[in-house]
């Protein structure tokens, strides 16, 4: 059992962001998870493949939810924050014109938890994940 986990259900907040150099180009993913009054920070460089920023946003969400599945129980309530309108709208509508493959890969991860509330936030409220994404991008350069 993870040191962040306790018996019973509790609320987890997850913030994700992506930073891309070029369009497409190398990408850094930033993820902040807040659970049980503790914070996990993840900065993941993705240099094996080029992607545009929207693909990066889906990749950050995918990686973040995969991390939650691997480290927390499946009875948690998840509050998911993103500054990507495309990502938040795609999850809310369960549809996206250009990112169906990415949404199809993300949906099973979201469905792992009984409640996932997705909330779009302005960039100014997502600075932590944004800074981690930029740190990850700089590791590639």
Image (cartoon, rainbow, N blue to C red):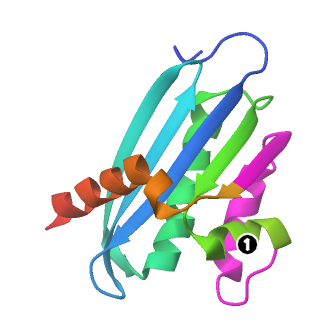
Q: Nearer the viewer, residue 118 or 27?
A: 118
Whole-percent x, y for residue 97 in the image: 72, 89
Instruction: Inspect the magenta stretch and tell me whether residue 114 lies in it.
Output: yes
Closer to us: 137 or 120: 120
Magenta stretch in the rendered image: 94-118
Local SS, label 1: helix
The residue located at (49%, 21%) in the rendering is 38
Residue 78 figure quarter: top right
Query: How far across and down, in percent of the image, does residue 112 sit?
Result: 78, 44
In the picture, the quarter occupied by the C terminus is: bottom left
Position of residue 140 relative to residue 64, above or below, is below
Q: Vertically, is 82 above or below 19?
A: above
Q: Is residue 117 magenta?
A: yes
**Residue occupying image coordinates x 66% and y 11%:** 6
Which image quarter holds the N terminus? top right
Q: Is residue 33 left or right of residue 99?
A: left
**Residue toward you, 71 or 81:** 81
């Amino acid at each position: 059992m993870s040191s962040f986990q306790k018996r019973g259900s509790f609320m987890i907040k997850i913030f994700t962001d992506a930073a891309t150099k070029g369009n497409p180009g190398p990408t850094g993913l930033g993820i902040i998870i807040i659970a049980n009054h503790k914070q996990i920070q993840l900065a993941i460089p993705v240099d094996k493949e080029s992607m545009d920023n929207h693909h990066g946003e889906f990749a950050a969400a995918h990686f973040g939810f995969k991390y939650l599945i691997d480290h927390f129980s499946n009875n948690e309530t998840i509050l998911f924050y993103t500054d990507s309108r495309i990502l938040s709208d795609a999850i809310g509508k369960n549809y996206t014109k250009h990112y169906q493959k990415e949404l199809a890969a993300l949906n099973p991860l979201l469905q792992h938890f009984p409640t996932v509330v997705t909330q779009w936030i302005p960039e100014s409220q997502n600075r932590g994940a944004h800074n981690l994404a930029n740190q990850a991008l700089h590791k590639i350069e």
